[in-house]
Image: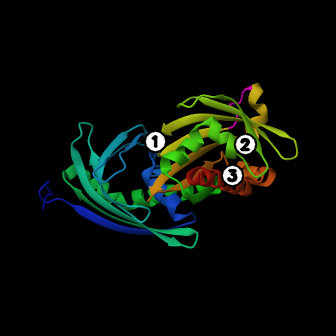
Amino acid sequence: MTQTATDAAERELVLTRIIDAPRELVFRMWTDPVHLAKWWGPRDFTNPVCEIDFRPGGALRIVMRAPNGTDYPMGGVFREIIEPERLVFTNCALDSDGNVLLDGVTVVTFAEQGEKTKLTVQTHAVALVPAAARYLEGMQAGWEQTLDGLEQHAQDTAARELVITRVIDAPRELVYEAWTDPKHLAQWWGPTGFSTTTHSFDFRPGGVWRFVMHGPDGRDYQNKITFIEVVKPERLVYKHGGTGDKEDRDLEPVNFHVTVTFEDEGGKTRLDMRSVFPSAKARDFVVKNYGAVEGMHQTLERLEEYLTKKVSS
């Protein structure tokens, strides 16, 4: 019997992977468009368009580009978000005019297994036109290759990251202010025994903070931060290190990106500080030569002590 749009073909898959990366990071791979664009789609596909409105009812739009240059647009809507445990979203293959060719729903669950993540993807798709039946034929291979890309990207990112989390007994607006005003920063920035002198502070996307950290041994450490994203009082994204210019050559070993998020928890603030380095080698260099992990912990301890005094005064 000839298949029609009303007698639609359909297929369902359940795929499971154990990914050697923390659950929060694997969840972020699905919800941050910068990450999603790097792994979504079959092998050797790219994603020149990857847009996410990450909220229940928010839209998802991706244009996958095949190695031969053919574009495959898709769209969807987030139906359910339970961070970092579960995502439910629609995913529809579209033609160039935006007509739905394949209608799908995907459920993704994230379970902790020690420091690894058990990922389960349950996806169901219905071909709405006869020509879309070929998408169903390649559905298994396409999803397997997509998860291969996710696994590789998650493991690579985990090897390049340093993540510190702390709950501070102070209002979110005050914690955010302490990160964005040089008068506050001078009171707590840096590990134990360090002090900080700011030479310039231009707080806006594209603006630069130039400062010197003075070590307890008398040594000075030149620093440069370039602000990339500023969302008061929720989020800061910045690049820490030089630009490759001759004047910044001494900063290159500590060139990395930092995302700081501030989340209200009943009058307290959950602060997440995530540093991403160009490579695992660069991350290990900073950990070994600069004591980055202990230094980050000491820095946030100083922030907490400073804010505790301000709140109680």
Q: Name which residue lies at 46% across and 42% down.
A: 67
The relative height of residue 138 versus residue 260 in the rendered view (above or below) is below
- What is the spatial separation of the Cα atoms under label 1 and label 3, in whole angstroms? 46 Å
Other-residue count near label 1 (Cα within 10 Å), few / some / many at <14 / 14–19 / ≥20: few
Q: Name which residue lies at 62% across and 49% down.
A: 275
Identify the element where label 2 is drawn: helix
Q: Report the front residue among 105 and 101.
A: 105
The residue identified by callout 1 is: 67
Q: Name which residue lies at 77% across and 54% down.
A: 291
Q: What amino acid type is highlighted by mark number 2? A: Val
The image quadrant of residue 154 is: bottom right
Q: Which mark is residue 254?
A: 2
- Choose the circle earlier in sequence order: 2 or 3: 2
Other-residue count near label 3 (Cα within 10 Å), few / some / many at <14 / 14–19 / ≥20: some
Q: Which mark is residue 299?
A: 3
Chain part drawn in magenta = 241-245
Percent of width and height locating residue 19: 53, 65
Q: Is label 2 or label 3 in front?
A: 3
Percent of width and height locating residue 120: 41, 68
